[in-house]
Image (cartoon, rainbow, N blue to C red):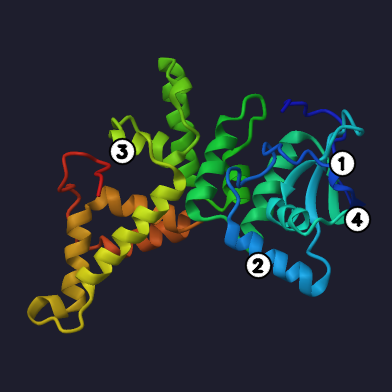
Amino acid sequence: MGTTTSKPTTTQKRPAKVALSAIALDNESGTARPGPLMPDWVKELTIALKNTGRLDPILLWASPEGPEAPLVILDGRHRIAAYRSEGVSRNIPATVITCPWREALLISARSHSKAQYPLTANERADFAWRLVRESGLAYSKSEIAKATATSARTVARMRARLGDAQRRGDEGKFTGSWWRDRDDRVETEMEDDMTEDQRRAYIEEGTKEIRNLLDRRGKSGWRSEISIVDECLIKALGVSRIRAVAEYTFPSTEDADEWFSTVTADSPDIDPHDDPMPDF
């Protein structure tokens, strides 16, 4: 997608009824959630469509440079999939936005952050990372942080990461996934071939194992004392990892700082791990 930032200088928004044929259905450049659709969510939307006859308007971008060009999806790929699965031939409700492409990406991020099926923290970070790397659009740190609900510190780290890679000529190695690109650690063969769906499955599996370990029911001694278990977790993770968790969890820098200061108040500054970003 081009990086034209000229006319119009203001965002024009209008409600419309749009034919599916007028939409670039396979173009994912405008969405903050590219990739495979979530079948369960499409199924829920399809049921809602059957029951009510309509869904909320999708969000589309019209190029100010080529108003006759196919409309680009900013938000609504799952709704479109529901319409298509039902064989809908009528025009569907939409909000069409005409603005510079630079602004369209911010609108897409804000829309997904507030949507009924919002982006996960990982997806928000990935889209923030994309905006940092967008050539010629020059987003400010605050623009990216606000649009993607990502902490300003994380965005600053992304910009520093990109700058370092550009100086070394290594930016071509980036995958677009922030959890992969954030440092120079060597990925295992498993990580290199891992899809996002596989990663989520491993997270679910690991979460169950950790929950079983931390479950105080039937435990005795120190394992039944939550304050001791909490401090064990903090010491095991280390200060740098706890800070990464804070930045990943909280959208604002202030909230992350407050939480981080609270949980590490009695912890040493020295990280127990040789690797500042240990893999667990």
Mark 4 or mark 3: name the one nearer the start of the chain.
4
CA distance for labels 1 and 2:
25 Å
Which residue in the protein does label 4 denote?
90
Q: Counting residues from the N terminus, which is met first, the one under dot 1 or under dot 2?
A: 1
For the residues labelled 1 and 3, say whether their Cβ atoms are less than 8 Å apart. no
Disc ID at residue 22: 1
Residue corresponding to mark 3: 190
The image quarter in which residue 56 lies: bottom right
Residue 44's mark? 2
In which quadrant of the rendered view does residue 274 lie? top left
Q: Decide: marks 1, 4 in contact (CB < 8 A)?
A: no
Q: Nearer the viewer, residue 65 or 212?
A: 212
The mark that comes first in sequence, 4 or 2, is 2
Q: Is residue 54 left or right of residue 263?
A: right
Instruction: Depth check: give the residue in front, 270 or 177.
Output: 177
2 or 3: tag closer to the N-terminus:
2
